[in-house]
Amino acid sequence: MPATAPTVLATSMGFDSRGRGPYDWAPGPVFDLAAQLAGAPPRPRICWLGTATGDDPARVAGFYGAFAGRDVRPSHVSLFPMPTVADVRAHLLAQDVVWVGGGSVANLLAVWRVHGLDEVFREAWAAGVVLAGVSAGSLCWHVGGTTDSFGPDLRPVTDGLGLLPYSNGVHFDSEEQRRPLYHRLVADGTLPAGHATDDGVGLVYRGTDLVEAVADRPGRAAYRVVPGGDGTAVETRIEPRRLR
């Protein structure tokens, strides 16, 4: 059983590509950080959830391939067509790190709630399991954010798990709709104040406090976005610590 403080690692980064196929992955440095946040166990247990892409078996295989030969204990939980472990709650609570892949955050949240994972993740968070992920796997831990779950024109999602009482913006520098829509939604109160990340950047929360931003490449940043009081939003840059 993990014994760290409640921790979320919410990112716009994750696996690196080895370049030999779409899911020929290698773990990016963020995974070393996740293990450190979990207390640096000698063989960390890390569980992949690919709910946001319908438990795509190619991505599941990519996850196992990324960690092949490494001193970790990888596992996964798929929910389609039925859970792949007998007791999902017990399995997730036994992990050091849970990593949630990107995709449709709206579909992810709906499926998780059908299976009671909203309550399981709240329990796991309180127990010290590091809850981490990229894109949809970042948005889900917050109150909400911007999503392409409903089509190419981004829309708000406002029914996140709410472990963190903030909104979240992902892919801030790489998808042109993200920043202006996020500003507008924070300004008009659709979303609460929150934090956003460029690609290659992550946010580390202990409890509900943001303790640092981290990056796996130069020239990227995180941002604090709050209502400006005059129908606008105010953005403040947060310089990340570079991961090695």
Image (spheres, rainbow, N blue to C red):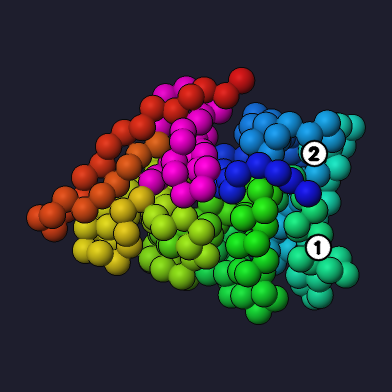
Q: Amino acid at mark 2?
A: Pro
Q: Amino acid at mark 1?
A: Ala
For this view, does 33 lie left or right of residue 175?
A: right
The number of numbered discs placed on residues in the rendered structure image is 2
Q: For the point 36% across and 32% down, which residue is it?
A: 238
User: Furthest residue to the bottom?
Assistant: 114
Front in this rendered view, residue 243 or 4 = 4
x then y, percent, for residue 42: 83, 31
Image vertical order of residue 230 relative to residue 19, above or below: below
Question: For residue 64, which quarter of the picture?
Answer: top right
Mark 1–mark 2 Cα distance, whole angstroms, equals 16 Å
User: Furthest residue to the left?
Assistant: 230
| Residue ID for mark 1 | 90
Mark toward the viewer: 1 or 2: 1
Q: Which residues are magenta?
A: 195-221
Q: For the point 67% across and 31% down, which residue is it?
A: 36
- Helix, strand or loop at label 1? It is helix
x then y, percent, for residue 190: 29, 66
Q: Is residue 35 visible?
A: yes
Q: Is residue 153 visible?
A: no
Q: Mark 1, residues whose alpha carbon is within 10 Å: few (<14), some, or many (≥20)?
A: few
| Residue ID for mark 2 | 44
For this view, does 13 lie left or right of residue 45?
A: left
Q: For the point 57% across and 39% down, which residue is it?
A: 13
Which label belongs to residue 59? none
Mark before the other along the chain sequence, 1 or 2: 2
Look at the image and say whether residue 220 sits in the magenta stretch: yes
